[in-house]
Amino acid sequence: MANLSTKLMGLDFRNPIVVASSGLTSSLERLKACEEAGAGAVVLKSIFEEQITAEVDGIVAAGETPYAHAEAADYIRNYGRENAVRRFIELISEAKKELSIPVIASIHCVSAGGWTDFAKRVEQAGADALELNIFVLPSDVERDGRYYEQVYFDVLAAVKQQVTIPVALKIGSRFSSIAHTANALAEGGADALVMFNRFSRFDFDIEEMEMVPASYLSEPSEMLIPLRWIALLSGEISCDFVATTGVHDGKSVVKMLLAGAAAVELCSVLYQHGVTRIGSVLEEISSWMDAHGFASIEEFRGKMSQEESMNPAGYERVQFMKTSEAQS
Ligand SMILES: Cc1cc2nc3c(=O)[nH]c(=O)nc-3n(C[C@H](O)[C@H](O)[C@H](O)COP(=O)(O)O)c2cc1C
């Protein structure tokens, strides 16, 4: 097999495949299965800001949560119980003892308030890096985009004050100027941007007239959104890029690496086929590299990023014109 090693945020990975934060990484047994299946690194299932604050402050009052939905507020209040924090910290230290691949902890947060010194405990427990999944739904008609964006900067600054391990931000794609925001986050100290978070979606059951969750797994076509933005921004912005959402096979991993990603997180495909699918993904990458004469990832990483095109906006417009001409 070709040399698949890569570097992310200064950490050495034996290959670019990272098992994304999810139920697949929620216990020591599952983490060991990821390592055995060949993963280059793992991101632990997130602990939620509400779990941290609930344990610190006792029960969070419903009115204090940013969720208007009563059921959501109830769920969140109860989620904090059962020593979630202790179990999370124990999992980090056990994983560090038992695994030889990098262990990245993950915190899912919606504000910079009250919980950020917990990041220090994550570092002390031995995590190699921290991934912050920040998501604030911009649903308040009184608040503009700048208000919501500021949450990302505040969280990043507060956490960076607490830790020296690398910090990655897992972000969504819906900023009014994603390029500007991504650049500002890198300048604000983000060591990597994980693009893009896949938000849970809801659907309507029109018989029961109820809101129901839509599929929690991604489709392969969803990878085109992170592919575009990683290709446009890598090389332009001084931080590493990690691809996530819609990557289901080795060919898609190769595309993300060509776009400039340093690593790729997999989740849905591993839920569908089991973590042993990592083996065939690695084989696909390796045979593509052999077929194209690449001995290492560094030889081709970023080869298809925007640096190949001096005017990315113009490039996009021409593609659109060509498509609409072909279809008319
Ligand atoms: C069942 C499930 C649980 C997840 N839990 C988390 C989580 O705790 N924290 C997080 O940052 N992302 C979580 N995710 C999102 C994944 O890490 C990943 O970013 C997303 O599924 C997109 O990647 P994919 O297309 O490979 O599935 C979860 C996804 C699934 C399907």
Image (cartoon, grey):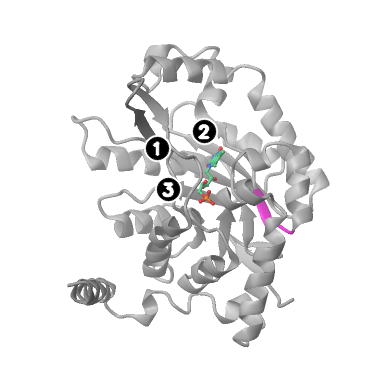
Q: Which mark is residue 201?
A: 1
Mark 2 lies on a secondary structure that is loop
Q: Earlier in the sequence, mark 3 or mark 1?
A: 3
Answer yes or no: disc 1 within 8 Å of ligand 1.
no
Q: Amino acid at mark 3?
A: Ile
The magenta-colored residue range is 38-42
Q: Nearer the viewer, mark 3 or mark 1?
A: 1
Residue 104, image x, y percentages: 64, 47
Whether pointer 1 and pointer 2 mark residues with C-beta atoms closer than 8 Å, the reply is no
Q: Amino acid at mark 1?
A: Arg
Q: Quadrant of residue 63?
A: top left
> What residue is pinned by disc 2?
116
> What residue is pinned by disc 3?
171
The residue drawn where x is 55% and y is 80% is: 300
Picture quarter with the C terminus:
bottom left
* Residue 56 is at least partly visible in this image: no
Mark 1 lies on a secondary structure that is loop
Q: Earlier in the sequence, mark 1 or mark 2?
A: 2
Picture quarter with the N terminus:
bottom right
Q: Amino acid at mark 2?
A: Thr
- Can you name the residue that lies furthest to the right here? 98
- Can you name the residue that lies furthest to the front here? 207
Q: In the figure, is residue 238 to the left or right of 81?
A: left
